[in-house]
Image: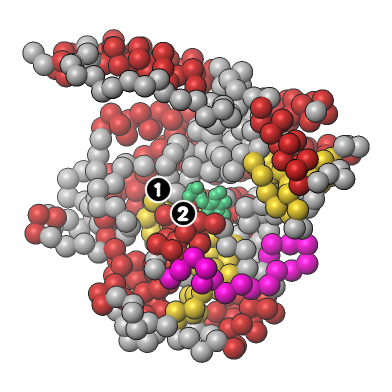
Amino acid sequence: MSQMQTDQQNFAQLSAQVSQWITQFQQQLPQRRAALVDDPQLPAHSIEPTTTGTQAAFAAFKQRIAPHLSATAGPRYFGFVTGGCTPAALLADWIVAGTDQNVAQGGDSISSEVESQALAWLRELFHLPNSFEGTLTTGATASNILGLLCARQFGGAQQGIDIARDGFSNADISVFSATPHASSQKAMAIAGLGRNQIQAVGCLADSEAMDVASLAKLLAANTSPGKIVIASTGTVTGTDFDDLVAIAALCKQHNAWLHVDAAFGIFSRLLPEKRDLSAGIELADSITCDGHKWLNVPYDCGIFYTRHLEYLQQVCSVAAPYLDIGSAAPSFMDRGIENSRRFRALPVWMTLQAYGIEGYREMIAANCQHALQLAQWIEASDHYELLTPCNLNVVVFRPKNSSDAEVKLCLTQINASGETFMTPGFWGGNSAIRAAISNWKTTAADIEQTCRLLEGL
Ligand SMILES: Cc1ncc(COP(=O)(O)O)c(C=O)c1O
């Protein structure tokens, strides 16, 4: 019998051991170091020449890797915009591996149908109209890439060029944005449009939000037939929201494609009192949202919607005799970058099934409340200053009267503590520290612990 067959025979015992280990890891997350800032290394070790089996591999994992895993999924990891993982989503992800479905197209399983339903549920959660269709992606970066590829295809169509078919050497495309996320610059590079080719739209005073008057001027002066505007619903530092109603009106007037990066900002739509922040998002041509951020499903999961599925399919369609199994279900390999795709729809489906609109509304409201708690403490503190009002889940601050080097040092000390993890930002031309609170596990006590840490530095 091969070792793989033996492992399969012993699957019940092996999976019980792994399950116990994961349960313990989860329970110890609040005590585990939020981040290991010293870049742990694996000991030099050649590949095993012989078969040792899962038991031995698991022992090696526990010895060499497990001690160096951080609590990125824990309650005080406030770096980037990092979600945790709800219990339902975590367990669903085990099922994903355990069932190993390939959600490329229909015709062999219900998995495509699950992705369709997950996308429909998310659309309801975000109060988006049914005209938006799309796909799950590997993250907001991939969704921004899809948005730009659709927009590029639209831009080509305005000048009689099918870019997906013929390339875009003759196409004239112009892209405008005020505060594009770094991933949109990456998307520009990947789409062959050039990361430095975004035409900078001005921002409103003390804000990362787009100055619509500045956009109006740029669009009026631009003669390109293929215009694209990238707007933001929640910028990554200031959590600022572009005026989508006004921007959409300008896009309509100038026949420009409107892509909205709403990676985490879209979750503000769950709170009635904050829904107006993203008014007009239903007028976008395409939207980026994220799953592994505020939806709290495991990595990796992004969401992409467009009102013009035809452009997405023109870009992503794939044809080969061996792929043609004649299913009527949506073909997700014709909607995204990958052909073979993970069943990442299941954690989305299961977490929405488990917690519903109410559970998510509570979680988003609680995270916003925790961010406010931290912001209010900072505002009242003698040592720190809040740099911009906290209007969602991100807190931007710095030590008072400090140089950029001192801000960096402060962030280094915060992260070296292991109690929390925050990431750098830039505000008003100066270095800042940003804390993004997007994990369902975070409690008021976690914020108090964080404030005690800041007080003691
Ligand atoms: C507004 C925005 N867009 C895009 C991204 C990129 O997301 P991901 O890392 O999931 O690709 C982020 C990440 O923080 C973001 O905040």
Q: Which mark is residue 141?
A: 2
- In the image, residue 155 above or below residue 110: below
Q: Which mark is residue 348?
A: none
Q: Which SS type dominates the magenta stretch?
A: loop
Q: Which mark is residue 138?
A: 1
Q: Position of residue 192 (x, y in %)?
A: 39, 68
Quarter of the image that includes the C terminus: top right
As drawn, which residue projects farthest toward the right? 382
Q: Position of residue 176 (x, y in %)?
A: 56, 74
Residue 177 figure quarter: bottom right
Badge 2 local density, few (<14 within 10 Å), some, or many (20+)? Answer: many
Magenta span: 193-209
Residue at the spot x=22%, y=13% of the render? 52
Q: Position of residue 354 (x, y in %)?
A: 47, 35
**Three-letter amino acid code of the residue under disc 1:** Thr
- 196 sits to left or right of 422: left
Q: Nearer the viewer, residue 294 or 227?
A: 227
Q: Nearer the viewer, residue 45 or 176?
A: 45
Q: How is the model colour-coded?
A: secondary structure
**Pointer 1 residue Cβ closer than 8 Å to ligand 1:** yes
**Pointer 2 residue Cβ closer than 8 Å to ligand 1:** yes
- 107 sits to left or right of 178: left
Q: Secondary structure at mark 1?
A: loop
* Label 1 – label 2 distance at C-alpha: 8 Å
Assess whether residue 197 is covered by the magenta stretch.
Answer: yes
